[in-house]
Amino acid sequence: MKVILRTFAIIVSFISAGQYAAAQISAANKPDSSGNGQGAVIIHQDARVDSILQMHIAYNKQQKGIDGYRIQIFFDAGNNSLNRATAVAGQFQLLFPGDTAYISFSEPYYKVRVGDFRTRLDAEGFLQEILPDFPNAFVIKDKINYPKPE
């Protein structure tokens, strides 16, 4: 008796699930009242979502770049360190005209860093190219410029 009741309950649940699914499909295929066959999506959200999104956009506009990697090819402190940093940056630009050298000052050092790499792997690959010309170069985490849209 229990087996028959269990079998009956399973059959009834399959039938009702099938009818429910068919009702969902037919409701989804009905056109809207305009008659053009297009549906409409209405989003109900808290007004604070828009304010948080605007705060996020404003914060990102203030950022000077994104996290990434550069290769540091020079750093020095002293009286002529700016002149030496400028000379090293110029030498790099002559050897690798497609890439940019950045001179920065972080007391008491002038640093020359090159490239804008999103991943460490990309930076390590370029490091292997420049090591013959700049043997003391190394990869460092830094803020990089936003990538150019393709």
Image (tube, rainbow, N blue to C red):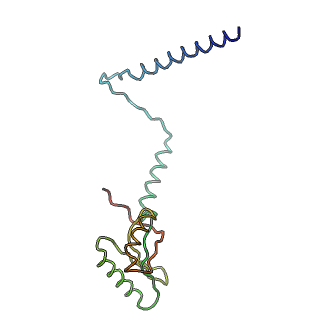
Considering depth in this image, is 134 or 112 the residue closer to the camera?
134
Outermost residue toward the bottom?
79
149 left or right, relative to 123: left
Question: Considering only vertical position in the picture, is 56 above or below 30?
Answer: below
> Horizontal and vertical percent for residue 80?
41, 90
The quadrant the C terminus occupies is bottom left
> Horizontal and vertical percent for residue 34?
32, 23
* Residue at the image position 48 percent from the left and 20 percent from the top: 21
In this rendering, the count of numbered labels is 0
Outermost residue toward the right?
1
Determine the image quadrant of residue 43. top left
Considering depth in this image, is 135 or 27 the residue closer to the camera?
135
Determine the image quadrant of residue 15. top right
Question: Considering only vertical position in the picture, is 109 above or below 60?
Answer: below
* Residue at the image position 46 percent from the left and 58 percent from the top: 59
Considering depth in this image, is 125 or 141 the residue closer to the camera?
125
> Horizontal and vertical percent for residue 68?
45, 64
The quadrant the N terminus occupies is top right
> Horizontal and vertical percent for residue 81?
42, 87
Considering depth in this image, is 33 or 64 the residue closer to the camera?
64
Outermost residue toward the top?
1
Question: Considering only vertical position in the picture, is 129 above or below 86?
Answer: above
